[in-house]
Amino acid sequence: MNELDALVTEAQQSFAQAATPADLENAKAQFLGKSGRITEWMKGLAALSVEEKKSRGAAINAAKQVIEAALTARRQTLAEAELQQQLQAEALDVTLPGRRRGQGGLHPVSLTLERIELIFGSMGFEVADGPEIESDWFNFTALNTPQDHPARSMHDTFYVESPAGATPNLLRTHTSPMQIRHAVQQVKKYRTALDAGQPIPEIRVIAPGRTYRVDSDATHSPMFHQCEGLWIGESVSFKDLKFIFTAFCRTFFESDDLVLRFRPSFFPFTEPSAEIDIQFQRGPLAGRWLEVAGSGQVHPNVVRNMGLDPEKYIGFAFGMGPDRLTMLRYGVNDLRLFFDGDIRFLSQFQ
Ligand code: DAH
C-alpha cells in the first residue's frame, strides 16, 4: 500500500470514528484543511519534476476526491442519525388517551327536576320560581295554617332574624307559598277582566325548588326539594288531579302499569286532602305502596287569599318530593348521598 492509500484509509477511519458533526469537522480539517495532510502533499509537489508533478498531482487529486466522498457520506450519516434521534425524542404517542378536563354533569335531583318540568310542561303547566326566605304570611297564614299550627314550631322551622317586633321571616318549609304568590300575580295581570266578570285563563303552574326543615336522617335532610303543583279554573275537579298525576307518574317512571292510590289525609290548605301513593307492578319495589305526594282540592280560604272568588273558582294542588322520586327512580336508599357531594356517587348519573 502506498502512502497516499494509507492516508485515504486513515481519513476514512477518522471520519468513521467522528461521533458528532463537530468531531467530523475537526477530522476534516486534519485531512482537507488549509494546513491539512492533503495540502502538505500538494506543497511537496513543488520540488518535483514536471513529469513527476503530473503523475503525483493526479494521484493526490484522486486521493482527495475519495476523502471528500467519504466526508460527504459521513456527514449525511451523522445528519440522518441526528434527525432520527430528534424524531425519537419528540415522538408523540398518538394512541395515548388525551388529558381531558372533567366535563361535569347535572345532579341526579336536577335531572329529576328537569324531567318534572318537561312532563308538566307538556301538559300545559307553567314553571314558577320563588324566594327561599319567605314571610310568615305566604308560608303559613295565607295557606289557612292557623297561628298555633304545629308546623310553625321552632323545632320544625328555621327562622331568620328580624327587627324586634317584626314577624320573623323563615326558610320556606314547603313550596306551597308559591300557590299564593303565583295566583296573586295572575290575578293582578287579569284584574280588569276579573272586575268585569269576564273569564280569565286557568292557572296551571308547577313550582319546583329548595325547602327547609329541622330534620335529618336517612330519609330527611334539613334542605330538601319540593315541587308544588296548582290548577285553578271554573270547573277543575279531583278527577283532573287523578288524571294529571297518574299521567305524570307513569311518564316519569316509564311504567304504564303503575298504580296510584289517593289516601284520605289532612292539610290545612286543602279540603278534601289526599296522600298520593304509587305501586310498581314489576321490579325491586313491586307490590309496596310508596308515598310520593300530598294533594287536595284547594281550600276556599286559600282561593280567597289568592284574590279569587271561591264560589266561582275551584281547583287542586299537590306537593311532591323530587328527592324521593329520584331515590325511587334510581334505587338510592339514603337521601344524604345526594347532598354529600361525593363525586364517585354523583358521576354515576352522567
Ligand atoms: N306542602 C305540603 C307539605 O310540605 C305538601 C302538600 C300537600 C302540598 C297537599 C299541596 C297539597 O299542594 O295540596 O307537606
Image (cartoon, rainbow, N blue to C red):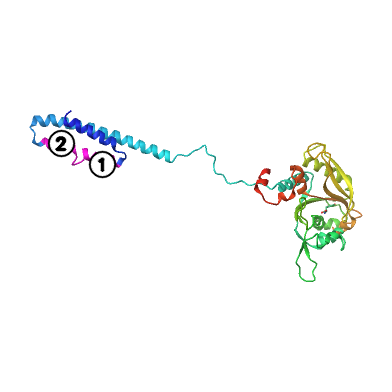
Which residues fall within the magenta stretch? 22-45
Q: Amino acid at mark 2?
A: Trp
Q: Residue furthest right?
A: 311
Tell me residue 100's x, y (percent).
Answer: 56, 44
Answer yes or no: disc 1 within 8 Å of ligand 1. Answer: no
In the shown orientation, is residue 345 left or right of residue 261? left
Earlier in the chain: of badge 1 and badge 2, it is: 1
Q: Is residue 33 magenta?
A: yes
Q: Residue furthest left?
A: 49
Classify 10 Å Cα crowding around label 2: few (below 14), some (14-19), many (20 and above).
some
- Give the numbered dot on residue 41: 2
Q: Looking at the image, which residue is at 23% across and 35% down?
A: 11
Label 1 and label 2: CA atoms lie apart by 19 Å
Kindly tell me whether residue 82 is visible in this rendering: yes
- Give the numbered dot on residue 26: 1
The N terminus lies in quadrant: top left
Quarter where residue 140 is shown: bottom right
Classify 10 Å Cα crowding around label 1: few (below 14), some (14-19), many (20 and above).
some
